Image (cartoon, rainbow, N blue to C red):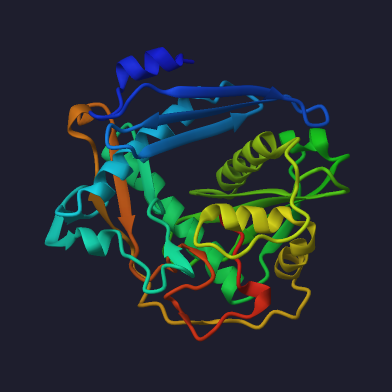
């Protein structure tokens, strides 16, 4: 496993980004030893980017670093408002048109209520194919979870796998695995792992993942769940839901509040009281992609952004352009953070 210094030397951050500040901590929630790592860099213009990862198996420094690099590339792309981009297929072949910056990074028509996720469907990989595959999986994952949530569709549930590392903290949590329905032709399985705490102060933890097989999807969701556990363990939990805000932190804080867990239980176990929303998405098509790869690393890694085509967009706050009409309280705040 490479050190942070080795990662910086081999795949440096784009020009303009400063020294990396590193946070690292060992945590032991109920017998499961975890390492969490957070990395932060600031651009000369004042903007910041953060990468984080947690693991109970190997050092998460490399995953945190490549997430940081991905976010630096994304921040640079968002800042270059005059840019336009070729639309590419999964093999990297250009389509017949280009896309403007405004269409690649759309803005909300109610910015005080909700905002688009700028990083949805963005992924880094050692090749164009690998980056595209990861970007597509993320877009499909969010689409499947949001469709299930807004349409009040109960996912299929299964007991926690026997070899799951989360069994080490099963005395603190009730864990369940879930599988979400996907649109035909996605070639992805979307899974979730949820851990409801037996009692405070254990935080609610969960994760999602999309891969070619159920086993790989559950493994990805488990990694995300483990990471969330590592970063949230020992943190003070809110007693009241936060005020609505168009940020991912709002969604996380909302479900750290115990009084909000009922919305997740209703959804995951089909307990009723949810009124489905009306989706007004375009016809679902396989996504096209934009190459955001930084010039100084073109022979080493690629950064791809998947462009939604009929997938439910990921937004933060209360509101979504794919929803016709108002959202009921039970489904107003989705769980993706």
Q: Quadrant of residue 146?
A: bottom right
Q: Position of residue 3 (x, y in %)?
A: 46, 14
Outermost residue toward the front?
46
Q: Tell me: 135 left or right of 278.
A: left
Q: Position of residue 233 (x, y in %)?
A: 73, 36
Residue at coordinates 76% horizontally, 61% vertically from top-left?
261
How many numbered marks have been drawn onto this rendered protein structure?
A: 0
Q: Which residue occupies 67% across, 59% down? A: 254
* Image-quadrant location for residue 35: top right
Residue at screen point 34% across, 41% down: 131
Q: Nearer the viewer, residue 64 or 178?
A: 64
Q: Position of residue 47 (x, y in %)?
A: 34, 40
Q: Does 228 appear above or below 191? A: above
Horizontal side, residue 102 vs residue 262: left or right: left
In the image, farthest residue toward the bottom: 325
Q: Is residue 163 above or below residue 188?
A: above
Residue 41: image quadrant is top left
What residue is rendered at 30% in x and 27% in y? 13
- Give the left or right position of residue 26, taking residue 265 as reference: left
Q: Nearer the viewer, residue 143 or 67?
A: 67
List x then y, in percent, for residue 150.
58, 74
Locate residue 287 relative to residue 67 in the image: left or right: left
Quick check: 159 above or below 310? above
Above or below, 196 against 334 in this view is above
């Amino acid at each position: 496993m490479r050190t942070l210094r080795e990662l910086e030397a081999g795949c440096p951050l784009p020009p303009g980004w400063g020294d990396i500040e590193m946070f690292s901590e060992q945590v032991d929630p109920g017998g499961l030893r975890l390492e969490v790592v957070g990395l932060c860099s600031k651009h000369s213009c004042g903007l910041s980017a953060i990468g984080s990862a947690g693991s109970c198996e190997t050092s998460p420094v490399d995953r945190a670093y490549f997430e940081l690099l991905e976010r630096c590339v994304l921040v640079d792309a968002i800042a270059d408002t005059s840019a336009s981009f070729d639309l590419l297929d999964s093999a990297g072949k250009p389509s017949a048109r280009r896309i403007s910056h405004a269409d690649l990074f759309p803005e909300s028509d109610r910015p005080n209520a909700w905002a688009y996720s700028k990083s949805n469907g963005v992924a880094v990989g050692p090749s164009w194919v690998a980056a595209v595959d990861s970007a597509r999986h993320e877009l499909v994952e969010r689409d499947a979870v949001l469709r299930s949530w807004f349409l009040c569709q109960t996912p299929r549930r299964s007991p926690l796998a026997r070899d799951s590392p989360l069994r080490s903290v099963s005395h603190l949590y009730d864990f369940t695995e879930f599988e979400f329905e996907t649109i035909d032709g996605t070639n992805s399985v979307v899974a979730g792992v949820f851990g409801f705490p037996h009692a405070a102060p254990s935080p609610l933890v969960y994760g999602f993942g999309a891969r070619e097989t159920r086993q790989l999807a559950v493994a990805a969701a488990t990694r995300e769940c483990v990471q969330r556990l590592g970063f949230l363990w020992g943190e003070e939990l809110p007693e009241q839901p936060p005020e609505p805000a168009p940020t991912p932190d709002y969604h996380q804080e909302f479900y750290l509040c115990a009084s909000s867990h009922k919305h997740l239980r209703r959804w995951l176990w089909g307990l009723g009281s949810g009124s489905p929303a009306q989706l007004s998405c375009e016809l679902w098509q396989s996504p096209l992609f934009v190459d955001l790869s930084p010039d100084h690393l073109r022979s080493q890694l690629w950064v791809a952004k998947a462009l939604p085509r009929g997938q439910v967009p990921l937004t933060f706050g209360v509101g979504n352009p794919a929803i016709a009409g108002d959202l009921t309280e039970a489904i107003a705040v989705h769980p993706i953070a």
